[in-house]
Image (cartoon, helix red, strand yellow):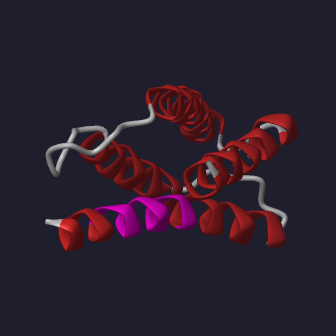
């Protein structure tokens, strides 16, 4: 059971890495766009995070403040990605610079909270 939990933790970190990596690729290309890959990374992080929030194996102590903070970060990040994707579809233009950098900062912060805390 511990191996399964470790795999889910690894996938959780990979989800944030995919989101942040896609953001870095767009920033390096100076496109300032949100991509489907960012959405998929966020979805992977959300699903694995919800699985990790369940108390398995029995007797594991959950850190509820960490879970709450990470959930809040994911909700805001999802909102920014959704707004960015909608704006890009509607106008064809890149997302505003502050919104784009907020996506990168939140993706990095979520990964940092997962690893450091």
What residue appears at the point 46 percent right and 49 percent down from the top-left corner?
A: 42
Of residues 37 and 17, the one nearer the viewer is 17
What residue appears at the point 44 percent right and 28 percent down from the top-left corner?
A: 64
Q: Which residues are magenta?
A: 8-17
What residue appears at the point 31 percent right and 38 percent down from the top-left corner?
A: 53
Image location of residue 100, percent across then percent down: 76, 44
Q: Main secondary structure of the magenta part?
A: helix
Of residues 113 and 99, the one nearer the viewer is 113
Q: Is residue 7 left or right of residue 78?
A: left
Q: Tell whether position 107 is magenta.
A: no
Image location of residue 95, percent across then percent down: 74, 40
Of residues 6 and 33, the one nearer the viewer is 6
Q: Is residue 55 left or right of residue 69?
A: left
Image location of residue 65, percent across then percent down: 52, 26
What residue appears at the point 21 percent right and 40 percent down from the top-left corner?
A: 55
Q: Is residue 21 left or right of residue 32?
A: left
Of residues 1 and 47, the one nearer the viewer is 1
């Amino acid at each position: 059971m511990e191996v399964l939990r470790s795999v889910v933790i690894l996938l959780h970190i990979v989800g944030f890495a995919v989101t942040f990596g896609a953001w870095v690729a767009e920033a390096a290309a100076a496109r300032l766009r949100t991509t489907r890959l960012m959405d998929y990374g966020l979805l992977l992080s959300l699903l694995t995070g919800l699985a990790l929030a369940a108390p398995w194996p029995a007797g594991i102590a959950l850190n509820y403040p960490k879970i709450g903070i990470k959930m809040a970060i994911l909700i805001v990040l999802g909102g920014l990605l959704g707004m960015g994707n909608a704006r890009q579809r509607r106008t064809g233009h890149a997302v505003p610079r502050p919104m784009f950098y907020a996506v990168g900062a939140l993706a990095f912060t979520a990964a940092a909270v997962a690893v450091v805390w």
